[in-house]
Image (cartoon, helix red, strand yellow):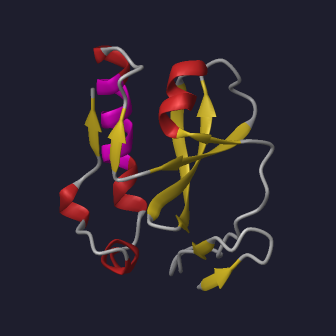
Amino acid sequence: MYKVSDETQDHIFEPKLATAIEKPIKKARMEYDVVEAQAKFGIFVFRDYHGILIRKDDVRFIFQVRFLKVPRRIYRVSCPAIIHAGILDEVQRQDLWIKLDAARDWIPQNDWTGVGMKREDRFLVLG
């Protein structure tokens, strides 16, 4: 599903899930950049994939996550394909890459090809 938000003119691609009920993207309490979230709270687990957000030329994959410091609440993070994580130490970068590598399989192939990427390309976490 493709829609344009009237408020921000953001382009949002929501996934079509064959085996689950389609989940609309809702306004979360907070949406964090994936690096900011890892640095401030520590990402405990990626839960669900919620689509692609395109702002101008910036393509971001949207996930629900739980944080280590706030484990009972669910938040949204946005994640570019190439992640500049200079504020994270090596252990935090490696932890983030491992979790993103597992979560990339939740992204449907047509979402990858829709933004000109391949699932095999993986997320790239740079230090």
Front residue (pair 30, 22): 30
Total marks placed: 0
Q: Residue at x 71, y 23 (%)?
A: 70
Residue at the left extreme? 120
Asked if 51 appears above or below 11 in the picture, the reply is above
Asked if 11 appears above or below 104 in the picture, the reply is below
Question: Is most of the magenta stretch helix, strand or loop?
Answer: helix
* Residue 25: % across, % down: 70, 65
In magenta stretch: residue 96 = yes
- Say left or right for 122 vs 100: left
Within the image, what quadrant is residue 98 found in? top left
Q: Residue at x 79, y 57 (%)?
A: 27
In magenta stretch: residue 42 = no
* Residue 75: % across, % down: 69, 41
Quadrant showing the C terminus:
top left
Q: Residue at x 23, y 68 (%)?
A: 118
Q: Residue at x 47, y 32 (%)?
A: 35
Q: Which residues are magenta?
A: 93-102
- Say left or right for 120 vs 108: left
Asked if 108 appears above or below 60 in the picture, the reply is below
* Residue 38: % across, % down: 51, 26
* Residue 17: % across, % down: 53, 77
Quadrant showing the N terminus:
bottom right
Front residue (pair 51, 80): 80
- Say left or right for 124 vs 44: left
